[in-house]
Image (cartoon, rainbow, N blue to C red):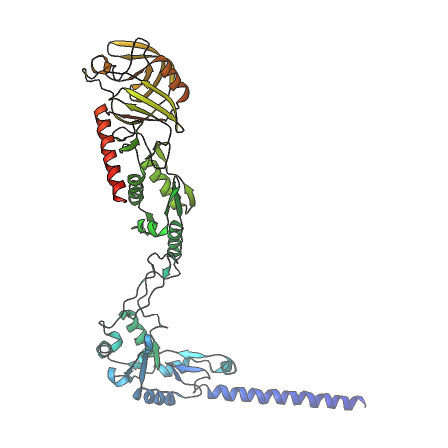
Protein backbone atom coordinates (compact mmCIF):
# COMPACT_ATOMS: atom_id res chain seq x y z
CA UNK A 1 0.00 0.00 0.00
CA UNK A 2 1.47 3.31 -1.14
CA UNK A 3 1.52 6.57 0.75
CA UNK A 4 -1.48 8.05 -1.10
CA UNK A 5 -3.74 5.15 -0.14
CA UNK A 6 -2.70 5.41 3.51
CA UNK A 7 -3.58 9.08 3.58
CA UNK A 8 -7.01 8.42 2.13
CA UNK A 9 -7.77 5.80 4.78
CA UNK A 10 -6.74 8.16 7.56
CA UNK A 11 -8.94 10.93 6.12
CA UNK A 12 -11.94 8.61 5.96
CA UNK A 13 -11.44 7.56 9.59
CA UNK A 14 -11.08 11.15 10.68
CA UNK A 15 -14.22 12.31 8.96
CA UNK A 16 -16.06 9.26 10.24
CA UNK A 17 -15.21 10.19 13.79
CA UNK A 18 -16.19 13.79 13.16
CA UNK A 19 -19.50 12.60 11.79
CA UNK A 20 -20.22 10.40 14.84
CA UNK A 21 -19.35 13.20 17.22
CA UNK A 22 -21.56 15.55 15.29
CA UNK A 23 -24.46 13.13 15.44
CA UNK A 24 -24.08 12.74 19.22
CA UNK A 25 -23.81 16.48 19.62
CA UNK A 26 -26.99 17.01 17.63
CA UNK A 27 -28.75 14.39 19.76
CA UNK A 28 -27.47 16.13 22.91
CA UNK A 29 -28.74 19.50 21.62
CA UNK A 30 -32.06 17.93 20.70
CA UNK A 31 -32.63 16.60 24.21
CA UNK A 32 -31.41 19.88 25.69
CA UNK A 33 -33.98 21.69 23.58
CA UNK A 34 -36.64 19.24 24.77
CA UNK A 35 -35.74 19.73 28.43
CA UNK A 36 -35.83 23.46 28.02
CA UNK A 37 -39.63 23.07 28.07
CA UNK A 38 -39.90 19.82 30.03
CA UNK A 39 -38.65 18.77 33.44
CA UNK A 40 -35.55 16.63 33.72
CA UNK A 41 -35.77 12.92 34.60
CA UNK A 42 -35.86 12.37 38.38
CA UNK A 43 -37.77 15.60 38.99
CA UNK A 44 -40.62 15.61 41.52
CA UNK A 45 -42.75 18.58 42.46
CA UNK A 46 -44.35 18.29 45.88
CA UNK A 47 -44.05 14.55 45.54
CA UNK A 48 -45.63 14.41 42.07
CA UNK A 49 -43.47 12.85 39.33
CA UNK A 50 -42.70 15.59 36.78
CA UNK A 51 -40.08 13.69 34.75
CA UNK A 52 -40.29 14.61 31.02
CA UNK A 53 -43.45 16.66 31.53
CA UNK A 54 -44.14 20.23 30.61
CA UNK A 55 -45.75 22.75 32.96
CA UNK A 56 -49.29 22.08 31.78
CA UNK A 57 -48.97 18.31 32.19
CA UNK A 58 -47.55 18.74 35.66
CA UNK A 59 -50.36 21.10 36.67
CA UNK A 60 -52.97 18.68 35.32
CA UNK A 61 -51.45 15.80 37.22
CA UNK A 62 -51.23 17.82 40.45
CA UNK A 63 -54.84 18.94 40.10
CA UNK A 64 -55.93 15.37 39.38
CA UNK A 65 -54.09 14.00 42.43
CA UNK A 66 -55.48 16.72 44.68
CA UNK A 67 -59.04 15.87 43.66
CA UNK A 68 -58.62 12.35 44.99
CA UNK A 69 -56.06 13.17 47.66
CA UNK A 70 -56.09 11.47 51.02
CA UNK A 71 -53.36 10.88 53.56
CA UNK A 72 -53.17 7.87 55.86
CA UNK A 73 -52.04 8.57 59.42
CA UNK A 74 -50.30 5.54 60.94
CA UNK A 75 -50.36 5.29 64.73
CA UNK A 76 -49.12 2.81 67.32
CA UNK A 77 -50.94 -0.40 68.17
CA UNK A 78 -51.75 -0.87 64.48
CA UNK A 79 -54.27 1.96 64.35
CA UNK A 80 -54.72 4.13 61.27
CA UNK A 81 -56.75 7.20 60.39
CA UNK A 82 -57.50 8.66 56.94
CA UNK A 83 -57.72 12.37 56.25
CA UNK A 84 -59.21 13.39 52.87
CA UNK A 85 -58.37 16.49 50.84
CA UNK A 86 -61.99 17.54 50.77
CA UNK A 87 -61.99 17.59 54.61
CA UNK A 88 -59.49 20.43 54.59
CA UNK A 89 -60.53 22.22 51.39
CA UNK A 90 -57.38 21.08 49.58
CA UNK A 91 -56.81 22.67 46.13
CA UNK A 92 -53.90 23.66 43.89
CA UNK A 93 -52.68 27.19 43.31
CA UNK A 94 -50.74 27.71 40.11
CA UNK A 95 -49.08 31.10 40.53
CA UNK A 96 -46.25 30.66 38.07
CA UNK A 97 -44.00 28.88 40.53
CA UNK A 98 -43.82 25.76 38.37
CA UNK A 99 -42.85 27.84 35.30
CA UNK A 100 -40.16 29.54 37.37
CA UNK A 101 -38.77 26.19 38.48
CA UNK A 102 -38.67 25.02 34.85
CA UNK A 103 -36.99 28.24 33.77
CA UNK A 104 -34.35 27.87 36.48
CA UNK A 105 -33.68 24.29 35.39
CA UNK A 106 -30.37 23.68 33.60
CA UNK A 107 -31.46 21.72 30.56
CA UNK A 108 -27.89 21.01 29.48
CA UNK A 109 -27.23 18.63 32.39
CA UNK A 110 -29.89 16.18 31.18
CA UNK A 111 -27.40 13.26 30.85
CA UNK A 112 -26.54 13.53 34.58
CA UNK A 113 -30.22 13.56 35.52
CA UNK A 114 -30.46 9.84 34.85
CA UNK A 115 -28.21 9.28 37.84
CA UNK A 116 -29.67 11.74 40.36
CA UNK A 117 -32.95 13.16 41.62
CA UNK A 118 -34.32 16.68 41.60
CA UNK A 119 -37.00 17.08 44.30
CA UNK A 120 -38.79 20.42 44.19
CA UNK A 121 -41.00 21.72 47.00
CA UNK A 122 -43.40 24.58 46.27
CA UNK A 123 -45.38 25.50 49.39
CA UNK A 124 -47.46 28.15 47.64
CA UNK A 125 -48.79 25.58 45.16
CA UNK A 126 -50.91 23.70 47.71
CA UNK A 127 -53.68 25.39 49.62
CA UNK A 128 -55.68 23.96 52.50
CA UNK A 129 -57.77 25.44 55.28
CA UNK A 130 -55.62 25.27 58.41
CA UNK A 131 -58.60 25.73 60.73
CA UNK A 132 -60.45 22.92 58.97
CA UNK A 133 -57.35 20.77 59.38
CA UNK A 134 -57.19 21.41 63.13
CA UNK A 135 -60.89 20.65 63.52
CA UNK A 136 -60.59 17.43 61.54
CA UNK A 137 -57.52 16.30 63.47
CA UNK A 138 -59.41 16.96 66.70
CA UNK A 139 -62.00 14.36 65.67
CA UNK A 140 -59.46 11.61 65.04
CA UNK A 141 -59.55 8.72 67.50
CA UNK A 142 -55.83 8.77 67.99
CA UNK A 143 -56.20 12.25 69.48
CA UNK A 144 -58.81 11.25 72.04
CA UNK A 145 -57.07 12.26 75.26
CA UNK A 146 -59.21 9.90 77.30
CA UNK A 147 -57.79 6.97 75.37
CA UNK A 148 -54.19 8.14 75.20
CA UNK A 149 -51.77 6.15 77.30
CA UNK A 150 -49.12 8.20 79.00
CA UNK A 151 -45.53 7.03 78.60
CA UNK A 152 -44.13 5.31 81.67
CA UNK A 153 -40.51 5.59 82.74
CA UNK A 154 -38.32 2.58 83.24
CA UNK A 155 -38.21 1.85 86.95
CA UNK A 156 -36.53 -0.46 89.42
CA UNK A 157 -38.63 -3.41 90.49
CA UNK A 158 -39.48 -4.39 94.02
CA UNK A 159 -36.98 -6.73 95.66
CA UNK A 160 -37.23 -10.40 94.81
CA UNK A 161 -35.36 -13.06 96.72
CA UNK A 162 -34.67 -14.91 93.47
CA UNK A 163 -33.69 -11.98 91.24
CA UNK A 164 -32.93 -9.11 93.59
CA UNK A 165 -33.70 -5.82 91.88
CA UNK A 166 -34.13 -5.49 88.13
CA UNK A 167 -35.08 -2.79 85.66
CA UNK A 168 -38.67 -2.79 84.48
CA UNK A 169 -38.53 -1.37 80.92
CA UNK A 170 -40.28 1.83 79.99
CA UNK A 171 -43.68 1.88 78.27
CA UNK A 172 -43.95 4.09 75.20
CA UNK A 173 -47.62 4.95 75.53
CA UNK A 174 -49.76 6.62 72.86
CA UNK A 175 -49.68 10.26 73.93
CA UNK A 176 -49.11 12.45 70.85
CA UNK A 177 -47.14 15.68 70.91
CA UNK A 178 -49.84 17.69 69.18
CA UNK A 179 -47.83 20.69 68.00
CA UNK A 180 -45.07 18.55 66.57
CA UNK A 181 -47.54 16.26 64.83
CA UNK A 182 -49.47 19.15 63.29
CA UNK A 183 -46.25 20.54 61.89
CA UNK A 184 -45.32 17.13 60.43
CA UNK A 185 -48.82 16.66 59.00
CA UNK A 186 -48.89 20.11 57.38
CA UNK A 187 -45.54 19.46 55.70
CA UNK A 188 -46.72 16.05 54.48
CA UNK A 189 -49.86 17.58 52.94
CA UNK A 190 -47.83 20.28 51.22
CA UNK A 191 -45.75 17.49 49.68
CA UNK A 192 -48.93 15.58 48.85
CA UNK A 193 -47.54 12.55 50.62
CA UNK A 194 -49.90 9.60 50.84
CA UNK A 195 -49.03 8.62 54.43
CA UNK A 196 -47.37 9.83 57.58
CA UNK A 197 -46.17 7.65 60.49
CA UNK A 198 -46.33 9.15 63.96
CA UNK A 199 -43.66 6.68 65.04
CA UNK A 200 -41.22 7.53 62.25
CA UNK A 201 -41.89 11.24 62.63
CA UNK A 202 -41.11 10.94 66.34
CA UNK A 203 -44.42 12.52 67.35
CA UNK A 204 -45.04 10.52 70.54
CA UNK A 205 -44.27 11.78 74.01
CA UNK A 206 -41.28 9.84 75.28
CA UNK A 207 -40.53 8.39 78.70
CA UNK A 208 -38.00 10.46 80.58
CA UNK A 209 -35.97 7.37 81.47
CA UNK A 210 -35.43 4.18 79.50
CA UNK A 211 -34.04 0.80 80.46
CA UNK A 212 -30.78 1.83 78.78
CA UNK A 213 -30.25 4.66 81.25
CA UNK A 214 -26.70 4.43 82.60
CA UNK A 215 -27.84 6.05 85.84
CA UNK A 216 -30.61 3.49 86.27
CA UNK A 217 -28.24 0.61 85.55
CA UNK A 218 -25.78 1.97 88.09
CA UNK A 219 -28.56 2.42 90.63
CA UNK A 220 -29.84 -1.15 90.32
CA UNK A 221 -26.27 -2.44 90.50
CA UNK A 222 -25.68 -0.62 93.80
CA UNK A 223 -29.00 -1.77 95.24
CA UNK A 224 -28.26 -5.39 94.30
CA UNK A 225 -24.88 -5.00 95.92
CA UNK A 226 -26.57 -3.95 99.16
CA UNK A 227 -29.08 -6.83 99.18
CA UNK A 228 -26.31 -9.24 98.22
CA UNK A 229 -24.98 -8.79 101.75
CA UNK A 230 -25.17 -11.77 104.09
CA UNK A 231 -24.20 -11.30 107.73
CA UNK A 232 -24.22 -14.32 110.02
CA UNK A 233 -24.18 -13.18 113.63
CA UNK A 234 -22.91 -15.71 116.13
CA UNK A 235 -24.22 -15.83 119.68
CA UNK A 236 -22.47 -18.84 121.10
CA UNK A 237 -23.83 -21.87 119.29
CA UNK A 238 -26.78 -19.91 117.93
CA UNK A 239 -26.74 -17.93 114.71
CA UNK A 240 -28.82 -15.11 113.29
CA UNK A 241 -28.64 -14.44 109.54
CA UNK A 242 -29.25 -10.99 108.09
CA UNK A 243 -29.81 -11.10 104.32
CA UNK A 244 -31.29 -9.19 101.42
CA UNK A 245 -34.87 -9.91 102.37
CA UNK A 246 -34.49 -7.71 105.45
CA UNK A 247 -31.95 -5.28 104.01
CA UNK A 248 -34.23 -4.52 101.04
CA UNK A 249 -36.65 -2.89 103.50
CA UNK A 250 -33.92 -0.43 104.47
CA UNK A 251 -33.13 0.77 100.94
CA UNK A 252 -34.79 3.68 99.19
CA UNK A 253 -34.07 6.05 96.31
CA UNK A 254 -33.62 9.62 97.48
CA UNK A 255 -34.42 12.92 95.78
CA UNK A 256 -31.03 12.89 94.05
CA UNK A 257 -31.85 9.53 92.45
CA UNK A 258 -29.30 7.76 94.61
CA UNK A 259 -29.61 4.50 96.50
CA UNK A 260 -29.88 5.32 100.17
CA UNK A 261 -29.40 2.91 103.04
CA UNK A 262 -31.46 3.96 106.04
CA UNK A 263 -29.07 4.11 108.97
CA UNK A 264 -32.13 4.52 111.19
CA UNK A 265 -33.38 1.11 110.09
CA UNK A 266 -29.94 -0.42 110.60
CA UNK A 267 -29.84 1.09 114.10
CA UNK A 268 -33.34 -0.26 114.82
CA UNK A 269 -32.24 -3.75 113.76
CA UNK A 270 -29.17 -3.57 116.01
CA UNK A 271 -31.40 -2.31 118.83
CA UNK A 272 -33.76 -5.27 118.41
CA UNK A 273 -30.80 -7.61 118.33
CA UNK A 274 -29.49 -6.07 121.55
CA UNK A 275 -32.89 -6.34 123.18
CA UNK A 276 -32.95 -10.05 122.44
CA UNK A 277 -29.33 -11.00 123.08
CA UNK A 278 -28.07 -8.50 125.67
CA UNK A 279 -27.93 -9.94 129.17
CA UNK A 280 -26.26 -7.07 131.03
CA UNK A 281 -28.53 -5.66 133.73
CA UNK A 282 -31.07 -8.44 133.34
CA UNK A 283 -32.01 -10.74 136.25
CA UNK A 284 -29.96 -13.94 136.48
CA UNK A 285 -30.96 -17.30 137.85
CA UNK A 286 -28.41 -19.01 140.08
CA UNK A 287 -28.51 -22.51 141.52
CA UNK A 288 -26.96 -21.37 144.75
CA UNK A 289 -24.57 -23.29 146.95
CA UNK A 290 -27.48 -23.61 149.41
CA UNK A 291 -29.30 -25.90 146.97
CA UNK A 292 -32.03 -23.36 146.25
CA UNK A 293 -32.46 -21.20 143.19
CA UNK A 294 -32.06 -17.47 143.65
CA UNK A 295 -32.63 -14.58 141.29
CA UNK A 296 -29.78 -12.08 141.18
CA UNK A 297 -31.27 -8.75 140.20
CA UNK A 298 -29.38 -5.54 139.45
CA UNK A 299 -25.83 -4.85 138.43
CA UNK A 300 -24.44 -4.60 134.94
CA UNK A 301 -22.70 -7.91 134.33
CA UNK A 302 -23.41 -9.59 131.02
CA UNK A 303 -23.33 -9.12 127.27
CA UNK A 304 -24.11 -5.68 125.97
CA UNK A 305 -23.87 -4.79 122.29
CA UNK A 306 -22.22 -1.47 121.50
CA UNK A 307 -25.16 -0.32 119.39
CA UNK A 308 -23.60 2.84 117.99
CA UNK A 309 -20.44 1.08 116.87
CA UNK A 310 -22.25 -2.00 115.56
CA UNK A 311 -24.67 0.18 113.58
CA UNK A 312 -21.75 1.96 111.92
CA UNK A 313 -19.95 -1.30 111.08
CA UNK A 314 -23.08 -3.06 109.83
CA UNK A 315 -24.01 -0.13 107.57
CA UNK A 316 -20.52 -0.25 106.04
CA UNK A 317 -20.72 -4.02 105.54
CA UNK A 318 -24.00 -3.56 103.65
CA UNK A 319 -22.62 -0.76 101.49
CA UNK A 320 -19.75 -3.04 100.51
CA UNK A 321 -22.03 -6.01 99.90
CA UNK A 322 -19.97 -8.34 102.08
CA UNK A 323 -20.69 -11.92 103.13
CA UNK A 324 -19.33 -12.31 106.66
CA UNK A 325 -19.69 -14.34 109.82
CA UNK A 326 -19.08 -12.30 112.93
CA UNK A 327 -19.94 -11.41 116.47
CA UNK A 328 -21.39 -7.95 117.09
CA UNK A 329 -19.31 -5.25 118.72
CA UNK A 330 -19.72 -5.38 122.49
CA UNK A 331 -19.30 -2.72 125.14
CA UNK A 332 -19.62 -5.41 127.83
CA UNK A 333 -18.68 -9.06 127.71
CA UNK A 334 -19.72 -12.09 129.71
CA UNK A 335 -18.24 -15.54 130.16
CA UNK A 336 -20.77 -17.66 128.32
CA UNK A 337 -23.60 -17.77 125.79
CA UNK A 338 -24.97 -20.96 127.32
CA UNK A 339 -27.76 -21.45 129.82
CA UNK A 340 -26.46 -18.49 131.80
CA UNK A 341 -24.01 -15.80 130.84
CA UNK A 342 -21.62 -16.18 133.79
CA UNK A 343 -20.73 -19.77 132.96
CA UNK A 344 -19.14 -21.95 135.61
CA UNK A 345 -16.57 -19.45 136.88
CA UNK A 346 -18.04 -16.91 139.32
CA UNK A 347 -18.04 -15.59 142.88
CA UNK A 348 -21.27 -16.20 144.77
CA UNK A 349 -21.77 -13.62 147.54
CA UNK A 350 -24.61 -14.13 150.04
CA UNK A 351 -25.02 -10.95 152.06
CA UNK A 352 -27.67 -12.53 154.28
CA UNK A 353 -25.31 -15.16 155.66
CA UNK A 354 -22.10 -13.13 155.08
CA UNK A 355 -20.60 -16.03 153.18
CA UNK A 356 -19.14 -16.43 149.71
CA UNK A 357 -18.09 -19.18 147.32
CA UNK A 358 -15.69 -18.94 144.39
CA UNK A 359 -16.11 -21.49 141.61
CA UNK A 360 -13.59 -21.82 138.82
CA UNK A 361 -14.51 -24.02 135.87
CA UNK A 362 -17.17 -25.57 138.08
CA UNK A 363 -14.78 -26.44 140.92
CA UNK A 364 -15.03 -24.82 144.35
CA UNK A 365 -11.78 -22.90 144.93
CA UNK A 366 -12.72 -20.78 147.93
CA UNK A 367 -15.40 -20.67 150.60
CA UNK A 368 -15.20 -18.04 153.32
CA UNK A 369 -17.04 -15.70 155.65
CA UNK A 370 -16.77 -11.96 155.07
CA UNK A 371 -17.99 -8.63 156.39
CA UNK A 372 -19.98 -6.41 154.02
CA UNK A 373 -21.17 -2.78 154.17
CA UNK A 374 -22.40 -1.24 157.39
CA UNK A 375 -26.18 -1.64 157.41
CA UNK A 376 -26.77 0.81 160.28
CA UNK A 377 -25.03 3.59 158.36
CA UNK A 378 -26.70 2.56 155.11
CA UNK A 379 -23.41 1.68 153.50
CA UNK A 380 -24.85 -1.63 152.39
CA UNK A 381 -22.96 -3.60 149.77
CA UNK A 382 -25.16 -3.43 146.63
CA UNK A 383 -26.82 -6.54 145.30
CA UNK A 384 -26.57 -7.56 141.67
CA UNK A 385 -24.38 -9.18 139.05
CA UNK A 386 -21.10 -7.43 138.35
CA UNK A 387 -17.86 -8.10 136.53
CA UNK A 388 -14.47 -7.83 138.22
CA UNK A 389 -12.72 -4.71 136.92
CA UNK A 390 -9.14 -5.73 137.66
CA UNK A 391 -6.97 -6.86 140.55
CA UNK A 392 -4.15 -4.93 142.23
CA UNK A 393 -1.58 -5.50 144.97
CA UNK A 394 -0.80 -3.12 147.84
CA UNK A 395 -3.36 -0.41 147.29
CA UNK A 396 -4.40 2.34 149.73
CA UNK A 397 -8.17 2.73 149.75
CA UNK A 398 -9.26 6.30 150.38
CA UNK A 399 -12.61 7.80 151.23
CA UNK A 400 -14.16 10.44 153.41
CA UNK A 401 -12.29 10.27 156.71
CA UNK A 402 -10.17 7.21 155.99
CA UNK A 403 -7.12 5.93 154.11
CA UNK A 404 -6.71 2.16 154.45
CA UNK A 405 -3.80 0.18 152.96
CA UNK A 406 -4.67 -3.34 151.75
CA UNK A 407 -2.57 -6.12 150.25
CA UNK A 408 -5.17 -7.42 147.77
CA UNK A 409 -7.62 -5.17 145.97
CA UNK A 410 -10.30 -6.51 143.56
CA UNK A 411 -12.99 -3.90 142.66
CA UNK A 412 -16.23 -4.90 140.88
CA UNK A 413 -18.76 -2.09 141.40
CA UNK A 414 -17.43 1.46 141.35
CA UNK A 415 -15.42 1.80 144.57
CA UNK A 416 -16.79 -1.45 145.96
CA UNK A 417 -14.62 -4.55 145.83
CA UNK A 418 -12.98 -7.46 147.65
CA UNK A 419 -9.95 -6.83 149.83
CA UNK A 420 -8.19 -8.22 152.86
CA UNK A 421 -9.01 -6.73 156.29
CA UNK A 422 -6.21 -7.67 158.66
CA UNK A 423 -7.65 -5.34 161.31
CA UNK A 424 -10.67 -7.59 161.80
CA UNK A 425 -10.45 -10.48 164.27
CA UNK A 426 -13.57 -12.28 163.02
CA UNK A 427 -15.77 -12.43 159.93
CA UNK A 428 -19.31 -13.47 159.18
CA UNK A 429 -22.17 -13.35 161.62
CA UNK A 430 -23.84 -9.98 162.18
CA UNK A 431 -20.76 -7.72 162.21
CA UNK A 432 -22.03 -5.97 159.09
CA UNK A 433 -25.13 -4.66 160.83
CA UNK A 434 -23.33 -2.28 163.18
CA UNK A 435 -19.65 -2.66 162.36
CA UNK A 436 -19.60 -3.24 158.64
CA UNK A 437 -17.39 -1.72 155.96
CA UNK A 438 -17.90 1.37 153.80
CA UNK A 439 -19.47 -0.99 151.24
CA UNK A 440 -16.60 -3.31 150.33
CA UNK A 441 -16.48 -7.04 151.02
CA UNK A 442 -13.86 -7.49 153.77
CA UNK A 443 -12.07 -10.88 153.58
CA UNK A 444 -9.68 -12.72 155.82
CA UNK A 445 -6.14 -12.22 154.60
CA UNK A 446 -5.68 -15.84 153.45
CA UNK A 447 -9.03 -15.82 151.66
CA UNK A 448 -8.21 -12.56 149.90
CA UNK A 449 -4.85 -14.01 148.85
CA UNK A 450 -6.45 -17.20 147.48
CA UNK A 451 -9.10 -15.26 145.60
CA UNK A 452 -6.55 -12.85 144.18
CA UNK A 453 -4.32 -15.67 142.94
CA UNK A 454 -7.16 -17.49 141.17
CA UNK A 455 -9.54 -14.83 139.89
CA UNK A 456 -9.21 -12.85 136.63
CA UNK A 457 -10.69 -9.58 135.40
CA UNK A 458 -14.17 -10.01 133.95
CA UNK A 459 -15.16 -12.78 136.34
CA UNK A 460 -18.83 -12.62 137.36
CA UNK A 461 -19.61 -11.49 140.90
CA UNK A 462 -23.13 -12.54 141.90
CA UNK A 463 -24.28 -10.69 145.03
CA UNK A 464 -27.62 -11.53 146.65
CA UNK A 465 -29.28 -11.50 150.09
CA UNK A 466 -30.65 -14.85 151.25
CA UNK A 467 -31.43 -15.44 154.92
CA UNK A 468 -31.40 -18.77 156.73
CA UNK A 469 -35.19 -18.77 157.07
CA UNK A 470 -35.62 -18.16 153.36
CA UNK A 471 -33.34 -21.07 152.55
CA UNK A 472 -35.31 -23.39 154.82
CA UNK A 473 -38.61 -22.21 153.35
CA UNK A 474 -37.39 -22.66 149.79
CA UNK A 475 -36.14 -26.19 150.52
CA UNK A 476 -39.40 -27.14 152.18
CA UNK A 477 -41.37 -25.84 149.22
CA UNK A 478 -39.12 -27.65 146.78
CA UNK A 479 -39.56 -30.87 148.80
CA UNK A 480 -43.36 -30.65 148.69
CA UNK A 481 -43.26 -29.99 144.95
CA UNK A 482 -41.08 -33.06 144.47
CA UNK A 483 -43.52 -35.19 146.50
CA UNK A 484 -46.49 -34.00 144.44
CA UNK A 485 -44.62 -34.71 141.22
CA UNK A 486 -43.57 -38.17 142.39
CA UNK A 487 -47.11 -39.12 143.50
CA UNK A 488 -48.52 -37.94 140.19
CA UNK A 489 -46.38 -40.54 138.42
CA UNK A 490 -48.06 -43.47 140.13
Using the image as rendered, state which of residue 346 and residue 313 is in the foreground.
346
Using the image as rendered, state which of residue 201 and residue 262 is in the foreground.
262
User: In the shown orientation, is residue 40 left or right of residue 20?
Assistant: left
Numbered disc total:
0
Position of the N terminus by quadrant = bottom right
Check the image and name the residue furthest to the right.
2
x and y percentages locating residue 361 in the rendered image:
41, 29
x and y percentages locating residue 414 in the rendered image:
29, 21
Position of the C terminus by quadrant = top left
Which residue is located at x 33 percent, y 40 percent? 311
Q: Quadrant of residue 220?
A: bottom left
User: In the shown orientation, is residue 10 left or right of residue 449?
Assistant: right
Q: Is 209 placed above or below 387 here?
A: below
Which residue is located at x 28 percent, y 33 percent? 284
Q: Is residue 94 visible?
A: no
Q: Is 18 placed above or below 429 here?
A: below
x and y percentages locating residue 327 in the rendered image:
39, 39
Q: Quadrant of residue 162?
A: bottom left
User: In the shown orientation, is residue 227 left or right of residue 141?
Assistant: right
Q: Quadrant of residue 302?
A: top left
Q: Is residue 214 visible?
A: yes
x and y percentages locating residue 140 in the rendered image:
25, 78
Using the image as rendered, state which of residue 134 and residue 462 is in the foreground.
462
Amino acid sequence: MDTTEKMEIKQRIFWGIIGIVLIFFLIYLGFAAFYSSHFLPGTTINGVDASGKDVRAVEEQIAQEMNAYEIKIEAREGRTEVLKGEDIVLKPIFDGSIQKELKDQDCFIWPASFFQEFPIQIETMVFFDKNALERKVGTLKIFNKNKMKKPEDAVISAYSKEEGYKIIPEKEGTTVQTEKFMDVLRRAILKLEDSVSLEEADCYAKPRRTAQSKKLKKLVKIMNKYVGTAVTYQFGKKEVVLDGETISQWISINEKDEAELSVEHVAAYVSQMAEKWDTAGKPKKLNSSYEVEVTVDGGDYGWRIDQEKETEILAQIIREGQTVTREPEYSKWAHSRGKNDYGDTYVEVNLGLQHLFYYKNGELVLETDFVSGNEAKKWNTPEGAFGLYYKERNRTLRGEGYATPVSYWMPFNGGVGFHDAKWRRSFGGSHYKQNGSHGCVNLPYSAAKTLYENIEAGCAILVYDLQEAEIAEAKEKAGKTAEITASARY
